[in-house]
Structures are given as structure tokens and as C-alpha cells.
Amino acid sequence: MADEVRITNADLIVDEGEKVQYIVIKLGNEQYGIDIKYIDNIIRMQSITRVPHVPNYIKGVINVRGEVIPVLNLRLKMGLDEIEDTKASRIIILKLEQFGLLGFIVDEVKEVVTLSEIQIEKVAYDGTDEKQNFVFGVGKTDTDLISLLDMNVVCAENGK
Amino acid sequence: MDVSQYLEIFLDETREHLSSLNTQILNLEQNPEDQDTINEIFRAAHSLKGMAGTMGFKRMQNLTHDMENVFSEIRNGAMKVSSNLIDILFQTLDALEEYTSNIQETADEGTNDNQNIIDMLNEFLNSKGETGGEEKPKKGKAKKAEKEAKEEAPAEEAPSGGASDEEKFRKIPIGETEEGVIAAAISEGKNVYGFTVYVNEACLLKAARAFLVYKAVEEKGEILLSDPSAQDIEDEKFDFDFSLIVISEHKIDDIINAAKAVSEIDKVVGAPLNASEAASQAKKEEDEEESKAPAAPAAEHKETAPAAAPAAQNAAKAAKTQGKPVVNRTVRVDIEKLDVLMNLVSELIIAKNSLVSASFTDGVSGASFNEQIEYLESVTTNLHESVMKVRMVPIESVVSKFPRMIRDLSKKLDKKMELYMSGEETELDRTVVDEIGDPLMHLLRNSADHGLESAEIRAQRGKPEVGSIFLDAYQDGNNVVIEVRDDGNGIDVEAVKNKAIERGVVTPEQAENMAEKDIINLLFNAGFSTAKVISDVSGRGVGLDVVKSKIEALSGEVEVHSKLGEGSTWTIRLPLTLAIIQALMVVVGGEKYAISLGSIQTIEDVSPDEIKLVQNEEVMTLRGNVIPIIRLDKELDTVSSKKPEDNLVVAVAKKGEKLAGFVVDELIGQQEIVIKSLGKYINKSKLISGATILGDGEIALILDANALI
């Protein structure tokens, strides 16, 4: 699954004139990029209805325009520590083929960047570091380094 | 060839034909001489063959072809129906059903040729039919070839014969604009042709064929006009021919050949049109309008003249037009569209609920406002009911296969039995009907295998030799009840108890204290599917626990009552709809939850010292019954906002015969709620069956009381 996704991403980069847009989010001091094609919506933090007996990174469900959407804490999902919500905290709602709509709590949503293929350095698959598996490449802009997240992999490890 | 867009129709119609074949063949077994039944079967087999052929399912086509052959002989009186044949036919149907389900899952029929069944059919033909020898399969082919030859023959003869009759394109009314376009095209040196395409009368997906012809012609030129219109053709609103006027740079033969290359097209006639002809045609249209009445019969006369075949075509047409109004009363609607409609109704109910709650919080009041709210409420409720009714289908589609199954079982188990069904017209939500087949089948198999005794034992007990199984369905308030009943042995409680102990489902001590009912209910326990139970008949690895979980997944419940020596009754109770329910809203640990009102019996105010401990579990006494207490705050991983010395609010819920008391912090009230799924990502929470959006936009989770009791 994961490999397939990587291939499609690579294809996309070539197909779309070598350029793909990413939403840049922050978790702590690190910046992560999410392919803009998955983004359904970005909303401010709102009250989340807790669901009992689910893994700790599933924070519950929210109501977005009449849809009940599960919300995950991206920090916890990626093995980071949970922090208090701040004014900058957002819920990014992604639409994934496999899971439908899913919300992710992130520390901050920064900007949209356009990266061309040559700006992305592929990360070799390394089975040891779990966090590393979520990242399929590192994008370099003039000022920053952005870890590009493969959201299908991030979500796929359900049940942990 | 792209026929995928017709796959749905194909599957639907195939199912209908198969189900009708099932019924008819059963009927045939009772009345082997009944000519109507034989004709009906022949027709269904023929239609199936045609459809499978059109869709390119060769194996399915072959099998139905042989089946059709057999019936063609029977119909001609050359052979008689025997019980052996009935068996072969049922096997054929099974094989066809397998193809159908393969096609549904993979859009491919699979690779099973079912050669053995084909052989059996042919053998039957050879042994009883007038023709002998091994030529039979070849004869089938020869027949086909002959048929094709026949089909081609008129095409060759036609042009010499009544060419003008066939060039129906000359009757296409040409408007002024089109006339201008034609003139312009001709002046540009392009050709204008008229075509009339005749589709094979046996063709079942005419629209698909026409579509392919359209595509083929469009590659060669521009279709200026068509009669009937493209939309009508797409909707299959044409008989067996349609006419086109085409502007093209290609030669006329090129286009005719392109159109002919599409299968099941009998012939294509065409001729170039020149400007004056087009103009005259335009004029003719005007004339025709004036003298339409006489023109039409004249055309019909011409058609009947050349040969008998067109006459037959007319007869078929007549039959079709007569039958049409009846067919058109119903509309096939994609279930997804109904889901969308249902969702919209749900949204409306949520919006209404918000309005009601806003009127309370914002203090809007006044008689007229309340009146309008009440009016809105009655409209949404009616709307909900109407949409719900649209989604309802009779359970007949599921249960109609059971008589056949019981017949098979009767042979296999060597027991005589009869199935009596009632209430097949009872309606349930389509999604429920789709799911209910397997559990019902299992219960019937169970009754046939374990319930009914062998003929000798039945004779000893003074029962009729033929065992009876009953399947009764009826509506009961907001529920539909389906009962499977047999007059067999009933459940041997001692045997169940012993087996349960042996399986380690209960300890011997527990078993001693259990009521008879509870012991029978052990049958539904997952650990109870014993090797002995999973026989070829009642098994397939599905135990009663699966029946139970399936029915509970549909928010239903299943119960069994049994009397040793007299028989058992399995009762399935299902809600009419799954999308919108009446719920009791409660608060636990500051969070709102909804519990289906259907399962709530009473609400009790209980003082803490009425709670007793039995075997380390909390219970209370309610009107003489000892019922277990379930503290929802603990089950839901939260902390009650109440102090230990406060009185408890207990919602007493019932599941089958069992009662349990749920301790909640607070009651909010009764509300109509719309059930929403928690999404694919959260599916492991057994306690929570879904969520609902409250009037203020907040989400409340729906507690599955059944999972807790």
C-alpha cells in the first residue's frame, strides 16, 4: 500500500508539470507538508465529542456541516507529546479514499508552498524509525526544510 | 465493447429471471404438463441467453442455450419433464446464479464452464429427445448458424424487395435549419446520407446497440438528425429500427459497414440524399402533418405485405405497447439516490430540532410561532415516513428462494418436509432486506436439519409423516416480525446444557442455576458452534451466534421458544428503518448520549441502599424481578457527576426476555434522532452504534443497549 502511494505521488509530480502544492503545518518546531489534494477543509478548534474505548490519538468526533468526522491528534499519532491547544491550533480535514473524511489536530497551519520535483529529496525507506515512515520526502524552499507526509501511511497504522 | 453502463440493468434483470425460473421450475415439478409454465421457462431462458450474449458472457450464454434447447423440445412435446430433469435444471440455476454473483463482484463471469451440467442437459436431450447421437452440441451450433443465415437472408433480399419501405430515413422530418445545414454541406462537397438501422428483434439491450452504432457512425461523420431522437434511443424508446441523417466525407458503404460491424444489427440500409430531396422531405413533413392519419396505416400495410416476419414484429410491437403502461408505473431508482434523499430528510429534521431548541433558548414564543413549529414538525415527520416507505421492499425477493432450498434439503436429508410461507409482502428497508437472507436461510436449514425428525420417529410420535416448517412475516408496530417455526423435535434443554458444559461455555454449577430459557439462549453463544452442528446442511461454518450478531447489527433481536417434542419457534424482530429513531437522551459524566427508546422499558428513581450485591455484581429488585445494574459512567470511561449518596436514575432496558438497569446522571428527554455513522476510522467501539447531531450542532453518541445487556 505504502509503496503504491509513493509511486502515485511521484507520478503526480511529473504529470502536473513537476509541481505540487503542499499545505505547510507545524508540529513543535518542525514543519510538515501535506499534499493539497487531500485537504477538504481547515477549521479552528472546536469542542470534540469524546468516543470511549478508542486509541488515545483519536480525540473524538466533530460536526462539520452535518457530517460526523473523527478527529485525530497528529502529534500523538506521530509519537510526539500532546500539548495544550493554542490560538494557532487548527483541525485539518482530509479526505482519504480509504477512510473518508478525517480531522487532524495540528499546532499551526503556516502557508501553501509549491514544490517542484527537483526541490524534493526522496527519503529512503527505513523500517526502524516509525516516524520516518510517514515522511516520503523532504522539500527544500529557500529558507526552510519541509518533511512531506504520506497521509495514507500516517492513517494506515490504525489500531496502535 | 463498452457495455459496463448496462451491467446494473443486466444484473437486475438476470436476477428477476432467475427468481422467476426458480418459482416456475418448482411449479413445473408439481404440474409437469402445464404448458404455460413451460412456455414461461422457455421465455426466461431465452431472455437470459440473449442478455448474457449481448453482454459478452459466453459461458453463461452457452449454459442457458442448452437449457433453452431442452425446453424447446419439451415445448414441442418431444420430451416429458422428469424429476431427474428438474434436478438438473436446479443445478443449472445454481450455476447461473454463480455466474451472476461473479459478474456482480468482478464484472466477469469467471472461468467455470460448468461442462458437467451442459453434458447432463445434452445427455438428457439425447436420451429422451427425438434426435440421437453425439451430434447434439454441433446441432446446437448448426442451429445457430442456420438462424444467423436466416437473419442475414432478409437483409440480402430486402433491397431488391421493398427497399423504399425500409428506407425509413426518408420519412424523417427535416426542419428548416437542418435543411440549410444540408444544403451548405452539399455545396461544400460533402455527402449527406440517410440510414435506417435495424436491430435484431431478439436483442435485449437495444439502447446499448444503438449507442454503439451511434459511436461507429460518429467516427465517420456528423449525425445531423436521428429519428427517434438520441435521447429517446438512449432511453430505449424505439422499436427495432432507427434512422439517421449523416453528413460525411466518407463513402456510404464505409458507414454502412461500420454500423453493421456492431453485433445484433440485422441490417443497415442507406442512400445519399441530395439537396432537393432534403427539401422535398422537409415539405413532405408539412404534408404529412396534414395527412398524418392516413399515412400511418398505409405504412403499416406495406410492412405486412412482404413477409410473415414483419407481421410477427408488429405483433410483438403490439404486445409491447399493450403491456407498457403497466411497466411504466414503477421507476427503478438507484438505492444511492434514495440514500441521498434520506440524508436530506435527516438534515431537515436536524434543522427542525435546532429551530425548536433555539426557540427555547432565545425565548422566542407566541402562539403563531409554536403553531408553525408544530406544522413543520408534522410535515417533516410525514416526509420522513414517505421517504422511508419508498425505501421499503417486500421481503418476497429474499424468501422466494426458500421453497426451492427446502425442496433440496428434503432430498439431501431424506426427510419429508414442506415449507409454508405467509406475509411475503411484508415490507422492510431495502438495506435490511438485503442482509436478512442469510440469517433466515440458516434458521430454516437449522429447522430442517435439527428440528424435524425422521419419518419413522414422526410416525412413532403420532405426527404427520411430512414435517412442516413455517415462515411467517408480519408488521408489529414499528417492528417487523419474522418467525421460523417447525413442528419437529424442539430443543432438548438437557442436551444443550450438557454440551454447553462440555464446551466450557458454562460451568456445571452455573448450568444448575440457569433457567430453561437461558440455557436455550446458550445456543446463540459463539462457543457453541460445535463440530457436530456444522454439517453440510446447517453449517457452512455459520453458527447461530452469527445469525444473532447479524440481526443485532441490523438493530434487531432474535429469540427462540421451544417445547420438546412439539417444535421450536425462532422469532426475529427488526426495526422498520435504520436511519431515524426515537431516542432517550441522557447525560453521563457531563456527556450526552442517546439510547434507542425501543429498548427502554421504564425509568426508575432508586435510592443507593436498594442496590444489592449478588456474586459481586450490583442488582436491584424491580417489581419482583432481580435485574443487574450497569453503571454507564464506568462502561464509558468517565466519572459520574453525582455523589454516591444521591438517588440513582436508572433506565431499565429490555433485550428479549432480559432486563438490565442503566445508571445515568440525568435525563434530558425523548427526541427523534438521525443516526450517523462514526466513519470507517472508528469501528471498534462496540458500545457505540453511531452518533447523532443535536439541535445545537453538538454531537451525541448513540449507546447500543443490546451490547451492554
Image (spheres, rainbow, N blue to C red):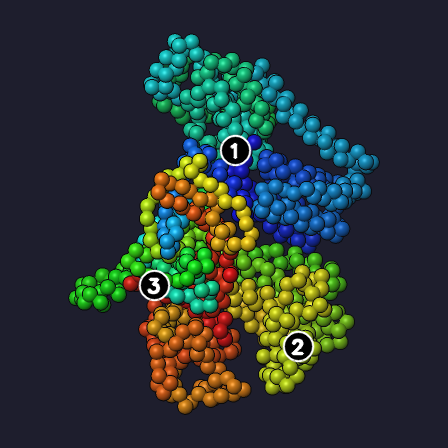
Between B630 and B207, the residue placed more toward the observer is B630
Q: Residues within 10 Å of mark 3 (few under 14, many from 20)?
A: few
User: What is the three-letter code of the residue carrying label 3?
Assistant: Glu
Q: Residue A9: percent from the left, percent from the top?
A: 48, 41
Which mark lies nearer to you, 3 or 1?
3
Q: Chain of mark 1?
A: B
Please state if A3 lies on the left or on the right of B89 as rendered. left
Please state if B552 lies on the left or on the right of B75 as rendered. left
Between A68 and B270, the residue placed more toward the observer is A68
Q: Chain of mark 2?
A: B
Q: Are marks 2 and 1 in contact (CB under 8 Å)?
A: no
Q: Residues within 10 Å of mark 1 (few under 14, many from 20)?
A: many
User: What is the three-letter code of the residue carrying label 2?
Assistant: Gly
Judged from the image, the secondary structure of the residue bearing numbered disc 2 is: loop
Q: Residue at x 46, y 25 (%)?
A: B297
Residue B507 quadrant? bottom right
Judged from the image, the secondary structure of the residue bearing numbered disc 1 is: helix
Mark 2 → mark 1, Cα distance in angstroms = 61 Å
Q: Check the image and report above or below for B646 versus B306.
A: below
Give the residue number, with chain letter if any, for mark 2.
B504
Q: Residue B71: percent from the left, percent from the top?
A: 69, 42
The circle on residue B208 is 1
Between B368 and B697, the residue placed more toward the observer is B697
Q: Chain of mark 3?
A: A
Considering only order in the chain, which callout, 1 or 2, is on the residue closer to the N terminus? 1
Q: Residue at x 43, y 79 (%)?
A: B631
Q: Residues within 10 Å of mark 2 (few under 14, many from 20)?
A: few
The residue lying furthest to the left in this view is B366
User: What is the three-letter code of the residue carrying label 1?
Assistant: Ala
Which mark lies nearer to you, 2 or 3?
3
Give the residue number, with chain letter if any, for mark 3.
A84
Which mark lies nearer to you, 2 or 1?
2
